[in-house]
Image (spheres, rainbow, N blue to C red):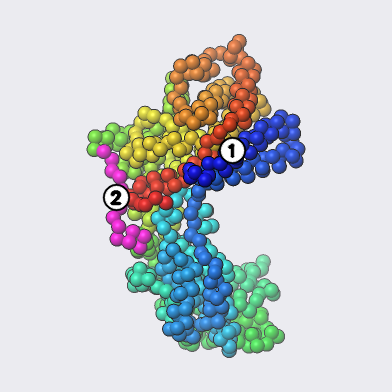
Amino acid sequence: MSEENIEPVRLATDALQAHERLHLHLRQSHRHTNVFQKSVDTLEQLREIKGELDGSAKNFDSPQICEDCLIELKQQVLMHTPSSVTSDNRDRFKDLINKTFEGIEVLSAVLLTCPWYQASQDERGEQARHNVLFIVYLSHDHQFLAPVNQHTLNEKFVEDKGWLYAIELYHFVHSIAKGKARCVEVLYCPDSAQLIQKDQWKQLKSQLNYTKVTKLRGYVEACKGQSISGIGKKGKDGKFRLVESTTFHQFCDSFRLMNHLYNVSADLPPCTDVTKITCLPDIAMKGKELLHKLYKDPDVSKRDLFDVLVQWRDSVTEDLKSVQYTDQLEVDEIIAKWQLETRLKGRQLNVPKVLPDEHSSLTTRMQEIGGQVAKLQPEQIILIAQAGSHMYGLATPTSDVDFLVIYAEPSQKVLGRCKEIKDNFESRGPSKLLEYGAYEARLFGEMLLKGSVIILELVFGDNHNYMSPMWKELVKQRKCFVTEKGIQQYLGLIQNNYKMLEKEREVAAKERKLLYQIFHKSDAVERMMNGDIPNVRCTGELREFIMNIRTRPLENEYDRNVLLTKAKQKIDGLLTSLAARKTRLKENMDFCAVTEWLLRVRGLNCPSV
């Protein structure tokens, strides 16, 4: 922590602890009032402030564009068609794009137009009215491989301003593999529409012939469905009827998609150039003529135009029955190989290996667990641990055998992926003699940063069944996971267990487990409050007490009500002690530490992120 932050952190800590005490008082007297909810919100805000000041609030570093040049860039986009872009215009485009995406590698920038809309307009200003500047960029390793879920990446890696659409490389290749028309248009647009194209981009176009993509079943079905579904709806008789609110631009989009569909049947590249709308069937040319009339005269019948579109669609659909679709796997392999090479930029992966003397025992353990775990390669295994009472040293002869496995998907597969990768699998249930749950390294990292108790216990624990060199490297830093967030997660589990016990009498087996976990996790909280790594494995008096809860009749000093009273006292004592502290731990887990570790798991030695 920098010296100038010491005083702000102290003040933030004082404010937060004072509010913790107020919140504890309100919990006891105003639990179901509006003032209590305000207190909850304030507590969360104070934690965020403290986290910002103590340096632990650092999170996913998403690509950020500079907005200084956006106004001029938008003007350029909406006043040019590809054919009107001169060399000077192109240079200006490049300059504005580079300034807007400073620090971000732009692989392709395309001035995307709708040829059917452009063909219906007489003035260039109108022709460019619905243009889109489509950017495909490459994120940094620590962004693409961050320990965050795909939903977060989808949200942070796509910038859509209507006239500007920027997506990260993964989203682009994912869309190409699915046959998304807009991205196919970008890849196979005319050179005049390309404002920026790196060598890697040119390589993809040369490696992936348009016929492979346009004859993907997904591309054909999408064009077929979207050409009508956006402007029509099917009636009870099965026929499509025009949606009366359909706009002129929507009509143009529908004809554009139909044009793509026709080109598939005619073995032509996708229509991305207005000059190509010339040698089309009569029904299509009739549609073009009606579009031009409709723009000039709103009284022209939209229904006539819609009927023309449906007739063209029916004709092309019949022709497509003889189309031989592309093997999806073939396209996926080409894209994956290209994306991998593009991301690595000539670097070699340094993927960790299994130590030779551990190989045999690890393989034996994997076969013992069986299922999907047995199908992994030994070098993919980061950790194998027995969970629950076995890890706590509290097992009885009737205890379940439950393994937790942390593994890594092959780095080539992760870096080249063109679709989401399943990142967990499990085999659990009352009929299973041996249960397991397996988590991919990225998901493990995400859960660790959220303070998942079961994941933290893996990190805080020792003497697991198998610990790879990468695991041992991570746990050297486990002190940085002793945080306020971790304490809150442990407390949440403790309080939830108590509520379940208080709500209704559970069956004996579950009741004992809920009770012993309260005391086991409470010990962990007490240790973390002092900045210590909690003991996952029970010893001494605590172990004896918990084993009595597990095995003795629930009577006398181990009567259910007696234990519930002790549990309540323990929880109240923890809350009081936490609120009475003069100091606090860092609020959050170390995002950078987890990200750097995850990059090394992938075989990438990277500078600090």
The residue most toward the left is 356
Sequence-wise first label, 1 or 2: 1
Query: Is 277 a magenta residue?
Result: no
For image coordinates 32% across by 39% down, the residue present is 469
Give the class, few, some or many, for how many residues have Cα within 10 Å of label 2's Cα (few <14, many ≥20): few
**SS class, disc 1:** helix
Asked where in the image residue 296 lies, by quadrant, the reply is bottom right
Q: Is residue 549 left or right of residue 354?
A: right
Q: Amino acid at mark 1?
A: Thr
Instruction: Tell me residue 113's x, y (percent).
Output: 52, 78
For image coordinates 61% across by 24% down, the residue present is 573
Q: Nearer the viewer, residue 55 or 26?
A: 55
Instruction: Tell me residue 305's x, y (percent).
Output: 62, 81
Q: Nearer the viewer, residue 173 or 239?
A: 173
Q: Which mark is residue 13?
A: 1
Instruction: Assess whether mark 2 and mark 1 are in contact (beta carbons under 8 angstroms).
Output: no
Q: Is residue 590 above or below residue 193?
A: above
Q: Nearer the viewer, residue 432 or 254?
A: 254
In this rendering, does residue 122 appear at all? yes
Residue behind mark 2: 350
Instruction: Tell me residue 297's x, y (percent).
Output: 68, 87
For image coordinates 39% across by 29% down, the residue present is 462
Asked where in the image residue 48 lies, by quadrant, the reply is top right
The residues bearing labels 1 and 2 have C-alpha atoms spaced at a distance of 43 Å
| Residues rendered magenta in the picture | 342-355
In this rendering, does residue 442 appear at all? no
Q: Amino acid at mark 2?
A: Asn
**SS class, disc 2:** loop
Instruction: Tell me residue 538's x, y (percent).
Output: 46, 22
The residue most toward the top is 556
Which secondary structure type mostly characterizes the magenta part of the structure? loop
